[in-house]
Image (cartoon, grey):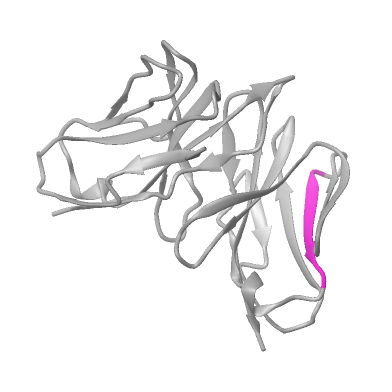
Amino acid sequence: KNEVEQSPQNLTAQEGEFITINCSYSVGISALHWLQQHPGGGIVSLFMLSSGKKKHGRLIATINIQEKHSSLHITASHPRDSAVYICAVGNTDKLIFGTGTRLQVFP
Amino acid sequence: NAGVTQTPKFQVLKTGQSMTLQCAQDMNHEYMSWYRQDPGMGLRLIHYSVGAGITDQGEVPNGYNVSRSTTEDFPLRLLSAAPSQTSVYFCASSYAGQGALYEQYFGPGTRLTVT
């Protein structure tokens, strides 16, 4: 069993829909990261969180340390949100990555 | 700031050849790392460094060497390329502290094919 599991693996949505991507992990961590990989391959960091909730624009990330679970929400989804979203967990010197959730948002 | 730069963007090698993938960052980050990304798998850590002169192995280190002589540069050397090393390679850097790695900055990636 992978130490970081993401669901769903693939997700399609209509523009304007509310999106939720889930991440569960089985190891002790000091922080959890959400990343976005563009269709062209570039990877950017969206959030780093160790407790609670963070919001940036239409993106919201939450984490429940006791349940070892995090969610990434996208409100009012747009075709430009189409990308692979990656969850990673880690400590002081290593990150372990999930296999990603491929999101396609259609107009 | 240029952020994290990687060269080359694309490379084709023959089995047995060696090469160095270059990675540099201008953000004074202590932590640098190399990952490979293969279809259907998450990014896997090859080697990492927590500061100049300090390197350590990740999950898949075999066939790769690294060194960190300066804070800015973290080259990855393939000693004798094998087809199993065909992959996309990413370098990343970040600050580290208080028991955690902070926001990760990734290079644009190097697509390597070994024939």
Q: Position of residue B3 (x, y in %)?
A: 50, 39
- B87 in magenta: no
In the depicted view, which residue is nearer to us: B16 or B6? B6
Is A69 in the magenta?
A: yes
| Residue at image location 45% in from the left, 19% down from the top | B71
- The furthest residue to the top: B53
Q: Position of residue A24 (x, y in %)?
A: 73, 50
Quadrant of residue B6 within the rendered picture: top left
Q: Is residue A82 left or right of residue A32?
A: left
When the figure is inspected, residue B55 is found, relative to residue A66, above or below; the finding is above
Coordinates of residue B48 in the picture (x, y in percent): 46, 26
Q: Which range of residues does the magenta coloring cover?
A: A68-75
Depth check, front residue: B91 or B2: B2
Q: Nearer the viewer, residue B69 or B40?
A: B69
At horizontal 38% and vertical 18% (from top left) the residue drawn is B68
Q: Residue at x 79, y 80 (%)?
A: A17
